[in-house]
Every structure is written in structure tokens, then in C-alpha cells.
Amino acid sequence: MILTILGFACLGHLGADFFSQWDRLPNKPLKCNMCLSFWLALIPLICVHGWQGPLIAAITGVTSETLYRIINRI
């Protein structure tokens, strides 16, 4: 489960960086690490983990934002 959370967090971070190059796209949920990670992970995690899926998706969003802040400090 830890690899799933980290994987979706990294995908959300990469996706937010990719979408940030276009000005016409909305800031949320496409350009926000936390939002994009949550929405990318929500449906697959609900399918795999049932009612715990939204909770794990929320943890994924927070993890993505934490990784983003740690990476920018280095």
C-alpha cells in the first residue's frame, strides 16, 4: 500500500508539472499537486480497497504535496 500511495503521489506531481505549461487550463485540479493526485487515485483505490479508497486517496494527495515541498527545498 505504501508503494501505491507513493506511486500515485509521484504521478500526480508529474501530471501537475506537465499541465502547468498551459495557461488556459484551470489551476485546480489540474495544476495542483494535491488535487490531481487525489483525483487520479480516487477511482482505482475505491475499486481495490472499497470504502477505504477515499481515505487512502486523501493520504496520497497530502503525500504528493509533502514530496513537492521537500523536493523544492533541496
Image: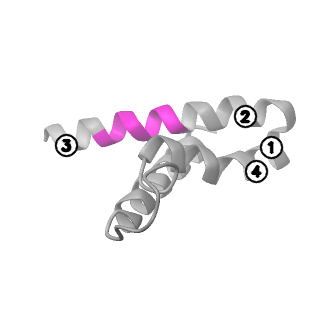
Kind of residue indicated by mark 1: Ile
Label located before the other in sequence (3 or 2): 2
Q: Position of residue 44 (x, y in %)?
A: 75, 52
Q: Label 2 is placed on what type of residue? A: Pro
Is residue 60 found inside the magenta-colored segment of the image?
no
Q: Mark 3 is on which residue type?
A: Asn
In percent of width and height, residue 43 lies at: 76, 50
For label 3, the residue is: 72
Q: Secondary structure at mark 2?
A: helix
**Which residue occupies the foreground of this view, 57 or 49?**
57
Q: Position of residue 33 (x, y in %)?
A: 43, 46
Q: Residue at x 72, y 34 (%)?
A: 54
Query: Mark 4: few, some, or many residues within 10 Å (few <14, many ≥20)?
Result: some
Q: CA distance from mark 3 to mark 2?
A: 27 Å
Magenta region: 61-68
Q: Is residue 3 left or right of residue 70?
A: right
Tell me which numbered mark, 3 or 1, is placed earlier along the sequence: 1
Q: Which residue is drawn at the image coordinates 57% and 42% (left, top)?
A: 5
Q: Quadrant of the C terminus?
A: top left
First along the sequence among labels 4 and 2: 4
Q: Position of residue 65 (x, y in %)?
A: 39, 37
Q: Which mark is residue 46?
A: 1
Q: Which of disc 2 and disc 1 is earlier in sequence? A: 1
Circles 1 and 2: CB distance less than 8 Å? yes
- Whichever of callouts 4 and 3 sits on the residue coming sooner in the sequence is 4
